[in-house]
Structure formats: structure tokens, C-alpha cells
Image (spheres, rainbow, N blue to C red):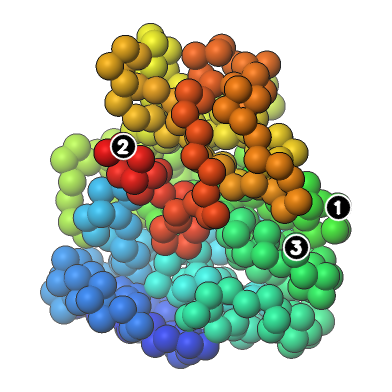
Amino acid sequence: MTALRALVVPPGPSALSMLAALDGALNGRAAAVLPVPGADPRQSDLLTTALRAGEEIDDDVALVVSTSGTTGTPKGAMLTAAALIASASATHDRLGGPGTWLLALPAYHVAGVQVLIRSVLAGTVPVELDVSAGFSVDTLPAAVNAMGSGRRYASLVAAQVAKALADPAATAALAELDAILLGGGPAPLPILEGAAAAGITVVRTYGMSETAGGCVYDGSPLDGVEVRIEADGRIVLGGTTLAKGYRNRTDPDPFAEAGWFRTDDAGALDDSGALRVLGRIDEAISTGGLTVLPQPVEAVLAAHPAIADCAIFGLPDDRLGQRVVAAITVAPGAQAPTLAELREHVGASFDRTAAPRELHILDELPRRGIGKLDRRALVQRFGT
């Protein structure tokens, strides 16, 4: 066995310094690495301690990626070289071949580090944007131009695409790319429609650190990936991109069934076998005898012309058990919709019990990590 090595990702455009370490870990010439954020010493120390950097780890593990889910406790998905190579190869096969990547996500998250791994395996050098102070569209056109010829890809989250769509030069730059992997949670319908209208090729991805990042693209599993739905609607993932397990074991262990990972997501397979993610099981709202998953309701709300972004969450209710609550941001130039209007809008698609009974209008929705909606923050803010 070798010892897990903490790999500090310095702030600024410096993630390319990780390429040699990742190459060594993938080829078995160097120890497994744990990327940690150099700009956040407190988080870096927490991950280094909690995931036991400096202690022995199995020789086949190349990368440990921190993952907290909604618990806030770092567990650390242990990804083997075989799983990382399978993920990168399947991604390139799906997209049309290896190419040059734009790195616009933090390289200590799985989506960012996968950009580097795909580049290592493709023999290319990614072009990096400095996102230490946030995503700036001003530098995007030059970065895309610097990617040169051949196939060109990027991995982004919905908030970044939305920001680019508000800038004509940035929009045109994204339209030049062969594909953009869009992860970090479901994208609002207006963003997807705006990207399509601008000629931007978006591939919606579903996956997590435990599956070496995105493993289902536009509802279709990558080669080597298996998907099944349990009786309670839970999504279970398996196949070649699966992590070996957690650095810190959990109880219950979602890896307990050999070759499978039990997610906390609910989903369904349509007649063609495509996966539709319905939402997190632990975010389900029990209201008036009905179980409401937030994401389908959000999808309906997102189609309302006055809504730019939205979130559905549950709050305690003496009569209903929980009541459905909506938080929205208003589309530029639009008049804020009323609660009655939104109840009518949702009621046209779902049982009226699923319609929001409380409305909050915000400047922006809280997000965590690389852009995932933070429902817990909304519950804490409005539940007192």
C-alpha cells in the first residue's frame, strides 16, 4: 500500500499544475491524490484530516474526491484508475472523440478534476479560466479561441451558462464548442431553451463523485454504466465508473451491494430506457397525504414566463404535516407573479396539493459547491 497524498489546488489559474500528479496516479507511478482547495485553508485542513491524508490506501485507488452530499460530513469517494479511465473514455466516445477541454470549474470537485483527467488521457492541455473570484464571461471568448482547432469541450453548471447567455460575445464563444457538459443539478428550462436557440450544444449530465462524475448523458447511460430503479423509485447505479467505496465508511453503506451504488435520488425509466431524475428522496415533501418531489414541480414553474429560477421545499405545517413552499427569482423585465397565479399554474399539471402555499421572491437562490441548489439553506431561512 501507498499513502494518500493531499494535492493542494492553489487559487487562481493554477490547476494545470495538477496534471503531472494525476498522470502519475492514473499510471500507478505515484500515490493516490486527494485534491483540496488551497484558497480555503480551513476546508483544506478538514478534508486532509477527515479523509486521512498521509495514511495508507489501496494501491488501485488513484483519486479520492471529497463528497458531503447533504450531510456536511466528508466521506471521500475512492476512485480507481480503471474507473477514471472508463469514465473519460466513455465520455469521449459519446461526444465524438478526444479533444481539448476548457477548465472553468474548481479542480477539487469531481467535475473539474475530470476535465484534467480527460485531458491527460487525450494527450491535450486544457485551457483554464480563473474562477477563484467567480465565473467571468469577459475572458471566455479569448479562452475558447486559445483552445485551437479540433474538437473542443467544456464542463459547466447552469449558472455559468445563464451568465454567458446574457453576453453576446460569450454566447457566441460557447456556440463554437462541440459540446458542453452541463451538470451540478437540473438546469432551468429557460437556460436550456436559450442555449438551444443560440446554437450551443448542451449535454445534460447526471452523476456524482461516487460514479466518477457524470455517468448518464441526456438520460442515456455511458458505455459500461448500468442503471436500475428500485421498488421505492430509488436510482441505483453500477458499472465500470463506480467508486470502490468511501474513505470513511458510512452506515448504512450505499456500496454494500457489490458492484452497485444506491443513490439518494428518485427516478424513472421511460419506454426507451432513458433515465428521468425526479429528485432527492430525502427532499420529498409529505403534504396532505401526498408525497411531492420538488424537481417535477420546479420544472413546471420554470416554464412560467415571469420566473428566471425557482426552488420548491417543504416547511412544517400543523394541518398538512408539511406545506409546499416556492422561492423564485423574477425574469428581467417581468412582473413578479402572485401566489394564486403560481398555484393555478402548477395545478394545471399536478394535483393542487402539490401547488405552493407560500411564496418568497429572492434576488438569487442559495447554492453550494459548484452550483447545486441549497434547499437546506432555504428551509433554515424561512422555517423559523
* Residue 327 in sight in this render: yes
CB of mark 3 within 8 Å of CB of mark 1?
Answer: no
CB of mark 3 within 8 Å of CB of mark 2?
Answer: no
For label 1, the SS is helix
179 or 43, which lies in front? 43
Checking the image for residue 197, the label placed there is 1
Q: Nearer the viewer, mark 3 or mark 2?
A: 2
Q: Nearer the viewer, mark 2 or mark 1?
A: 2
x, y percentage for residue 11?
Answer: 42, 86
Q: Is the C terminus in the top left, top right, bottom left or bottom right quadrant?
A: top left
Give the distance between the C-alpha atoms of the residues marked 2 and 1, in whole angstroms.
Answer: 39 Å
x, y percentage for residue 213?
Answer: 48, 57
CB of mark 2 within 8 Å of CB of mark 1?
Answer: no
For label 3, the SS is helix
Give the distance between the C-alpha atoms of the residues marked 3 and 2, in whole angstroms.
Answer: 34 Å
Residue 53 shown left or right of residue 383 in the figure:
left
Residue 208 shown left or right of residue 69 in the figure:
right
Kind of residue sitting beneath label 3: Leu
Sequence-wise, which precedes: disc 3 or disc 2? Answer: 3
* Residue 259 in sight in this render: no
Residue that label 3 marks: 165
As drawn, which residue projects farthest toward the top? Answer: 289
224 or 195, which lies in front? 195
Residue that label 2 marks: 383
Disc 1 packing (10 Å; few <14; some 14–19; many ≥20) = few
Disc 2 packing (10 Å; few <14; some 14–19; many ≥20) = few
Kind of residue sitting beneath label 1: Ala
